[in-house]
Amino acid sequence: MKSNVSAFDGWFRSLLFIVSLCYAVMVGGSSWLWVIPTAILFATAVLAWCPLYEMLGINTNKEEGTSH
C-alpha cells in the first residue's frame, strides 16, 4: 500500500476528528453523526493512505514519489 496522504493532510484530518469529537461531546444529540466520517478521515491519516485519493489519482504525499 503506497502512501498518498501528506503529513500536513494527515494532521489536518486528525484535527478535524478531534474538533468534531469535542463538539459532539459538548453538544450531544445528532452531532455524533459527524464523528463517524471524521473517524474515517482519522483512520486514513493514521494509515497515510486514502482509498478515495487512490481512485481519483490524487497524491498529496510528494515525498513518496521522489527518489534521492
Image: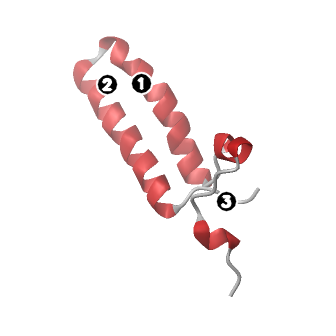
In the rendered image, residue 25, in percent from the top left (x then y), is placed at: 29, 26
Depth check: 63 or 30 in front? 63
Q: Residue at x 28, y 29 (%)?
A: 23
Circle 2 SS class: helix
Amino acid type shown at disc 3: Ser
Circle 3 SS class: loop
Q: Rounded to the nearest whole Å, what is the CA distance between mark 1 and mark 3?
A: 25 Å
Left or right placement of residue 15 versus residue 52 in this view = left
Q: Residue at x 60, y 72 (%)?
A: 63
Amino acid type shown at disc 1: Trp
* Residue furthest to the top: 29
* Residue furthest to the bottom: 68
Q: Which residue is mark 3?
A: 3
Q: Rounded to the nearest whole Å, what is the CA distance between mark 1 and mark 2?
A: 8 Å
Amino acid type shown at disc 2: Ala
Height in image: 47 above or below 41? below
Tags 1 and 2 in contact by the CB under 8 Å rule? yes
Q: Residue at x 29, y 33 (%)?
A: 22
Image quarter where the C terminus lies is bottom right
Marking on residue 24: 2
Q: How is the image coloured?
A: secondary structure
Height in image: 30 above or below 17? above
In the rendered image, residue 12, in percent from the top left (x then y), is placed at: 41, 50
Circle 1 SS class: helix
Tags 2 and 3 in contact by the CB under 8 Å rule? no
Image quarter where the N terminus lies is bottom right
Q: Which residue is mark 1?
A: 34
In the rendered image, residue 2, in percent from the top left (x then y), is placed at: 73, 59
In the rendered image, residue 50, in percent from the top left (x then y), is placed at: 64, 46
